[in-house]
Structures are given as C-alpha cells and as structure tokens.
Image (spheres, rainbow, N blue to C red):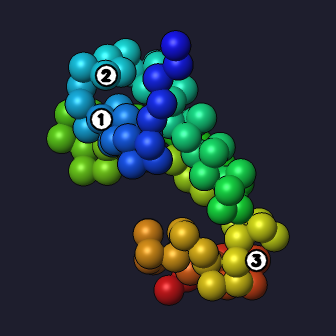
Amino acid sequence: MAKILKDSEMAEVIHRAVHDDDVICCSDAYAHFLKDLSELICTHFGGVRGMVSGPDYPGDELGWTCGFLVNECVPSDGGVFARYDTDVVWSEEKEVQA
C-alpha cells in the first residue's frame, strides 16, 4: 500500500535532507540531490541552474551553494529569487548589480 504524504510532509523531508546529516550522508549524493532540487526550482519558477558547489574547507560560511541564472521564465520582479543574494537583482530578464 502506498504511503500518502501531505505537501507539508514532503517539505519536511526536504528540510530534513538539508539539515540532518544522517539523511544524506555522502557528499556526492548530496550534490546530486541539490542538482535535482535546483532543476525542480527552475522548472516551476524559471531560471537556469548553474554550478552546485560544496564547502571548500571547514568553516566556509556559505557551505553548499547553487548558482541560478535568469531566463525568460523568471517574472520581471525576480520572482521567488528576489529575496535571496540581494547583491544581484534580476529585472526584465537582465541581471544588474544592486
């Protein structure tokens, strides 16, 4: 029989994968997870996935990151990306420095 998960429970699974070290314990698997997650974000909110990178050394402030590039599917106000990395602003399919 199938397990039925609510939308909030699916969000919890993703939260656990990002915050609990025992959910995805291999860095290669985690990088693949982030690539898949970033593709899902782009599919539904626009943009193009850039590079996924892990922490370069212990104590790296950014930790794991993924770059996103603007495309014609991103709303003119920057959409869901507008509140993040506010040094870069997307407007009308163009990137401008804030």
Badge 3 element = loop
For image coordinates 48% across by 30% down, the residue present is: 4
Question: Are dots 1 and 2 in contact, CB under 8 Å?
Answer: yes
- 3D distance between C-alphas at marks 2 and 3: 37 Å
Q: Quick one: which residue is furthest to the right in this view? A: 72
Classed neighbour count for the residue bearing mark 1: other residues with Cα under 10 Å, few (<14), some (14–19), many (≥20):
some
For image coordinates 77% across by 67% down, the residue present is: 73
Task: Kindly identify which residue carries mark 3.
Answer: 93
Of the two numbered discs 2 and 3 in the rendering, the one whose residue sits closer to the viewer: 2
- 3D distance between C-alphas at marks 1 and 2: 7 Å
Sequence-wise, the earlier of marks 1 and 2 is 1
In percent of width and height, residue 48 lies at 71, 54
Classed neighbour count for the residue bearing mark 3: other residues with Cα under 10 Å, few (<14), some (14–19), many (≥20):
some
Q: Nearer the viewer, residue 96 or 38?
A: 38
Q: Nearer the viewer, residue 43 or 95?
A: 43
Sequence-wise, the earlier of marks 2 and 3 is 2
Q: What amino acid does circle 1 point to? A: Arg
Badge 1 element = helix
Whether residue 55 can be seen here: no
Classed neighbour count for the residue bearing mark 2: other residues with Cα under 10 Å, few (<14), some (14–19), many (≥20):
few
Whether residue 81 can be seen here: yes
- 3D distance between C-alphas at marks 3 and 1: 33 Å
Residue 65, relative to residue 79: is it above or below? above
Q: Is residue 90 left or right of residue 5?
A: right
Q: Which quadrant holds residue 76? A: bottom right
Badge 2 element = loop
Task: Kindly identify which residue carries mark 2.
Answer: 23
Task: Kindly identify which residue carries mark 1.
Answer: 16
